[in-house]
Amino acid sequence: MGPMLDHLSLGVGDLEAARKFYKAALKPLGYRHMRDHAEEGAAFGIGPHAPQFWIGRVKRPKPGAGTHIAFAAPDRKSVRAFHKVALKAGGRDYGKPGLRPHYHPNYYGAFIVDPDGHHIEAVCHLPE
């Protein structure tokens, strides 16, 4: 069985702020900017090998709108790097890196609110 998601799209109000934020915040997790699309208002794709996470401009995004996206991290060091870089790139802290044993004993995550109010997480499920 492969990954649960093939790709994901997220609408944002300020495409350039989102581009800056996601390129920086996801780099420590091994993801990179892969492709731009000029059609349908402009978008860009990020992924490890192919664009799986698409960010596109929308006219009136609703801040947060219940969006929560968790990105897999290869280790706890990457989770900490994600949090640090995401804050510098314009995100707001929504949960410092650490264990969340109420999910399971090895759940190590960090939470950020992106410039459009979306809740973004990096998580590692491996023991230290």
Image (cartoon, grey):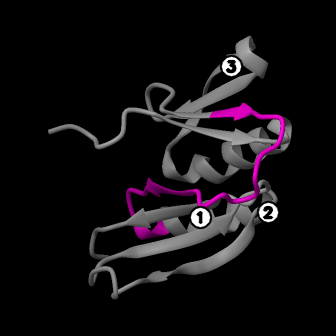
User: Residue at the location (59% across, 64% down)?
Assistant: 81
Q: What's the residue type where badge 3 is placed?
A: Asp
User: Residue at the location (38% across, 65% down)?
Assistant: 124
- Local secondary structure at mark 2: helix
User: In this picture, is 10 found above or below 25?
Assistant: above
Q: Does the magenta stretch include residue 70?
A: yes
- Local secondary structure at mark 1: helix
Q: Name the residue under label 1.
A: 81
Residue farthest toward the top in the current orientation of the protein: 39
User: Which one is in front, 40 or 72?
Assistant: 40
To which quarter of the image does residue 111 belong? bottom right
> Going from the N terminus, do you reach mark 2 or mark 3 first?
3
User: Residue at the location (74% across, 60% down)?
Assistant: 117
Question: Quarter holding the C terminus?
Answer: bottom left
State the separation of the CA atoms marked 2 and 1: 11 Å
Nearer the observer, disc 2 or disc 3? 3
Residue stretch rendered in magenta on the structure: 55-77
Q: Where is residue 64 in the image (x, y as percent from the top left)?
A: 69, 59
State the separation of the CA atoms marked 2 and 3: 24 Å
Q: What's the residue type where badge 2 is placed?
A: Lys
Q: Mark 3 points at which residue?
A: 36
Q: Position of residue 114 (x, y in %)?
A: 72, 58
User: In this picture, is 35 found above or below 66?
Assistant: above
User: Which one is in front, 127 or 4?
Assistant: 4
- Report whether 20 appears left or right of 4: right
- Report whether 68 appears left or right of 126: right
Q: What's the residue type where badge 1 is placed?
A: Ala
> Going from the N terminus, do you reach mark 1 or mark 3 first?
3
